[in-house]
Image (spheres, rainbow, N blue to C red):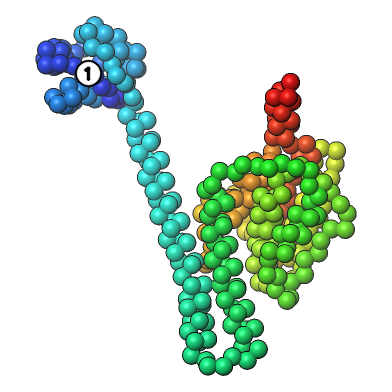
Amino acid sequence: MGIFIDGHHVDETLLAKAKEQANKESGRDIATLSMLYNPKDQELYCIIDASDEKTIQRYHAELGLDCDFVTPVEHIHTKAVQNAERLKAIGELSARLAHDLRNPLSVIKNTVEIMEHKQRLSIEDRIVYFGRLHRAIDRISHQIEDVLDFVRPINLTLQNNLVNEIIASAIEKITVPDLVKINTPANYVHAVCDFTRMEVAINNLLMNAIQAMNNAGQVDVILTENQKQAVIQIKDRGCGIPQEIMPNIFEPLFTTKQEGTGLGLASCKKIIEQHGGTIEVSSVVGKGTTFTITLPKQSIHLEKQINENSEVAA
């Protein structure tokens, strides 16, 4: 037996008949637990204990009642839980984003106030203060982009791209600390992908690598390929990821950092899987982490586009 909610459009006559029949249900494989009637709209809602939906529909057919709907209560509960979890996630993300934006905004505010009070700024002061402003603005921009990259739909523009150019463009958008060296590949590899979206994914992984090394060390970007796949590896010599949290690192909002939305790796995974690729991670605590991306040489999405274009041309 299960608990269901059903709805009917009934007049006063049918309502009386339904109530009378509900009192005679003992011994049957159905029982009406509660009834609620809205006289204005002539809508009757019943909470019923029955074996299945067909039993309820058959029973009401005997009474001459048409069911507008029959829904298991657990479905309603599941939807309510999903809505609650969604609202909780939105609240958590909003609180985290507000916290993360407060610090760079304070830096901007304080720096501007200092510049206002100083009547004359030397060239050295200008370099220091404007550098501070640029870093704070970059940080705000990165946090907002993290959220947008995760929540907005991904519409891929697929082309045959040189992966080396995507890597170079991603590095250009990062403020690389003086004590960090990023070793880029000497060999050239092509892949069918969306240049901008893959740039975002690689940018996120490079920034994670730099942060894992506390802004000092070497990051190796390695390119290999086979007949079907292009393979990108990003390897740092940082603190590594503990094995107990490895299964969670691609989950939205998961982070071990004091700051950050927890959406960077989730966005990377979403972008790469949208291409029909994969992302995997291996790590040794105290030695470093390697992220391995595989991209198909011929994307299934591009094949679909080509086929659709061929059909239109025909």
Q: Residue furthest top?
A: 62
Q: Residue furthest right?
A: 187
Quick check: 43 above or below 94? above
* Of 223 and 23, the residue lying toward us: 223
**Residue 267 in the image, given as x and y percentages of width and height:** 59, 50
Quick check: 47 above or below 12? below
Quadrant of the snapshot with the C terminus: top right
Q: Amino acid at mark 1?
A: His
Residue at x-position 88% and y-position 54%: 187
User: In the figure, is residue 189 to the left or right of 106?
Assistant: right
Residue at x-position 11% and y-position 12%: 13
Quadrant of the snapshot with the N terminus: top left
Residue to which mark 1 is pinned: 9
User: In the figure, is residue 238 to the left or right of 19?
Assistant: right
Residue at x-position 38% and y-position 36%: 79
How many numbered callouts?
Answer: 1
* Residue 296, quarter of picture: top right
Q: Could one spot residue 284 in this view of the protein?
A: no
**Residue 265 in the image, given as x and y percentages of width and height:** 61, 53
**Residue 289 in the image, given as x and y percentages of width and height:** 71, 59
> Regarding mark 1 in the picture, which secondary structure is present there?
strand
* Residue 157, quarter of picture: top right
